[in-house]
Image: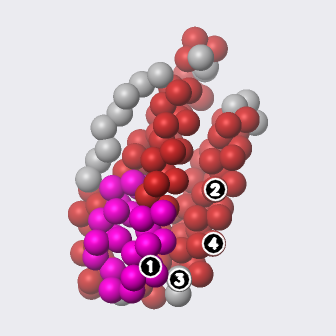
């Protein structure tokens, strides 16, 4: 698959794959941190979906990336300091930004359109936890 991908598309695919991998760790870390069990269960489910998204991008990029722990370390700390009323809209915004990031490649790779739709839904889900 990777041989037909432009340099710009590959850059977007790799950035997207990295973001999804990082989100898996972030959501699992938040699930271990948050006080509300419903929130924790939601974050565990989102982590599973983000892992699936990472695999979609891996098939396209044909590259194996390692998740970065930065958000998994930082966001639980921010949750403890700021609380969910401030943190959750920030997380939702990240999901909505992914929708925009995936737009240029979603037209060319139909499997990304499904991921894009999920990211919109993820943003809505996180906002609904408030």
Mark 3 Cα-neighbour bin, 10 Å: few <14, some 14–19, many ≥20: some
Q: Residue at x 39, y 82 (%)?
A: 37
- How far apart marks 3 and 2 lie (CA) works out to 17 Å
Question: Rounded to the nearest whole Å, what is the CA distance between mark 1 and mark 4?
Answer: 13 Å
38 is within the stretch colored magenta: yes
Tell me whether the residue at label 1 lies in contact with that at label 2, contact meaning CB atoms closer than 8 angstroms.
Answer: no
Residue topped by disc 2? 118
- Residue position marked by numbered label 4 in the rendering: 124
Residue under numbered circle 1? 39
Magenta stretch bounds? 23-45
Question: Residue visible at 28% across and 76% down?
Answer: 33
Q: CA distance from mark 3 to mark 4?
A: 9 Å
- Comes first in the chain, label 1 or label 2: 1
Please name the residue shown 58% across and 11% down the image.
3
SS at mark 1? helix
The residue identified by callout 3 is: 129
Residue 62 in view (yes/no): yes
Q: Position of residue 124 (x, y in %)?
A: 63, 72
Q: Does label 3 or label 2 sit earlier along the sequence?
A: 2
Q: CA distance from mark 4 to mark 2?
A: 10 Å
């Amino acid at each position: 698959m990777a041989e037909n991908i432009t340099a710009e598309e590959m850059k977007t695919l790799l950035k997207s794959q990295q973001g999804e991998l990082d989100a898996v760790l972030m959501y699992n870390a938040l699930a271990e941190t948050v006080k509300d069990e419903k929130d924790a269960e939601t974050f565990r489910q989102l982590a599973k979906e983000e892992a699936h998204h990472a695999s979609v991008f891996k098939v396209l990029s044909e590259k194996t990336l390692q998740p970065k722990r930065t958000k998994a370390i930082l966001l639980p700390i921010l949750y403890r300091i700021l609380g969910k009323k401030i943190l959750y809209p920030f997380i939702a915004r990240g999901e909505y930004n992914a929708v925009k990031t995936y737009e240029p490649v979603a037209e060319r790779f139909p499997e990304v359109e499904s991921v894009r739709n999920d990211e919109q839904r993820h943003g809505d889900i996180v906002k609904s936890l408030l």
